[in-house]
């Protein structure tokens, strides 16, 4: 009941990666796939791109992939590592997932589409993953988008807190009100959480902020007072809307 060629295609594996074996668990309704690579290859350092021989392998993780019909599908592989003289021992980049991700890029692409039309709870039920897993997929997608964006400060920003996990942990969100986009995510809801956003811009750029929509939360207000330059009242001053 194994079809190595089929699953290699479904996973989008390309040389030097191939499917080694497939295990079908009908009772557990899951498919497990093990990928391997050819021997004697040189691998690129993920930091500088220098090509070097295999040093060793990292412990074998598991990635959730798109379902095979109604069966959950999981990919297994031992990621190669290189020993770069400048950057030390590092795991090479894998073609199917980001570093530290536990879902393949194809699964995360589907998850992001579902999260775009559902709340986290609804998306979790559809995708058959936990609330935390759905949130982390969304958080990684936002982080990737922020890295690609140019660092420009909006004239009008919104600051909000969101509970994550079981409701006892928080993150800080900074939004571009005019574009309706998330520009920054900070851990917790402390003053330092918002300080990290303002610290990305020199004072000259922070002077361009015209208005800030924020709940009455002393740590946020303290951060705004410390980082947003005040202006004379007769001119267009920075306004905090609470």
Image (spheres, helix red, strand yellow):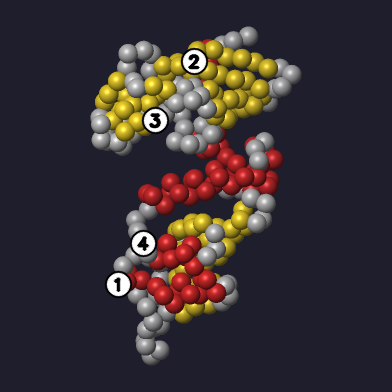
Asked if the residue at tag 3 contacts the one at tag 1, i.e. Cβ–Cβ closer than 8 Å, the answer is: no
Quadrant housing residue 39: top left
Nearer to us in this view, 22 or 55 = 55
Q: Nearer the viewer, mark 2 or mark 3?
A: 3
- Residue found 67% across the figure and 36% down from its top: 128
- Residue found 61% across the figure and 48% down from its top: 117
- Residue found 64% across the figure and 50% down from its top: 165
Who comes first in sequence, dot 2 or dot 3? 2
For mark 2, what is the residue? 19
How far apart in space, not on screen, are marks 4 and 2 (Cα)? 44 Å
Q: Which mark is residue 200?
A: 4
**Quadrant including the N terminus:** top right
For mark 3, what is the residue? 91
Who comes first in sequence, dot 4 or dot 2? 2
Q: Residues within 10 Å of mark 4 (few under 14, many from 20)?
A: few
How far apart in space, not on screen, are marks 3 and 4 (Cα)? 29 Å
How far apart in space, not on screen, are marks 1 and 4 (Cα)? 12 Å
Percent across and percent down for residue 9 are 49, 19
Percent across and percent down for residue 91 are 39, 30
Q: Residues within 10 Å of mark 2 (few under 14, many from 20)?
A: many
Q: How many marks?
A: 4
Q: State left or right for residue 26 relative to residue 76.
A: right
Asked if the residue at tag 2 contacts the one at tag 4, i.e. Cβ–Cβ closer than 8 Å, the answer is: no
Q: Quick check: can you spot residue 62?
A: yes
Per the image, label 3 sits on a secondary structure element best described as strand
């Amino acid at each position: 009941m194994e079809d190595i060629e089929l699953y290699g295609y479904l996973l989008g594996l390309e040389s030097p990666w191939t499917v080694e074996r497939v295990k079908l668990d009908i009772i557990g309704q899951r498919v497990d796939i093990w990928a391997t690579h050819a021997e004697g290859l040189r691998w690129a350092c993920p930091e500088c791109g220098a090509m070097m021989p295999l040093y060793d392998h990292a412990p074998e993780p598991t990635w959730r992939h798109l379902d095979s019909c109604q069966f959950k599908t999981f990919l297994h592989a031992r990621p190669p590592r290189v020993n770069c003289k400048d950057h030390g021992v590092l795991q090479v980049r894998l073609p199917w997932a980001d570093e530290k991700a536990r879902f393949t890029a194809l699964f995360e692409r589907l998850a992001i589409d579902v999260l775009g039309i559902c709340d986290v709870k609804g998306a979790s039920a559809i995708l058959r993953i936990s609330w935390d897993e759905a949130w982390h997929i969304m958080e990684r997608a936002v982080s990737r988008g922020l890295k690609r964006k140019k660092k420009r400060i909006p004239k009008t920003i919104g600051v909000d807190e969101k509970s994550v996990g079981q409701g006892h942990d928080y993150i800080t969100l900074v939004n571009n009100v005019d574009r309706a986009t998330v520009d920054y995510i900070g851990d917790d809801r402390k003053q330092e959480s918002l300080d990290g956003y303002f610290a990305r811009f020199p004072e000259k750029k922070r002077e361009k902020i015209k208005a800030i929509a924020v709940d009455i939360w002393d740590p946020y207000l303290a951060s705004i007072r410390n980082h947003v330059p005040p202006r004379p009242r007769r001119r267009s001053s920075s306004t905090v809307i609470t």
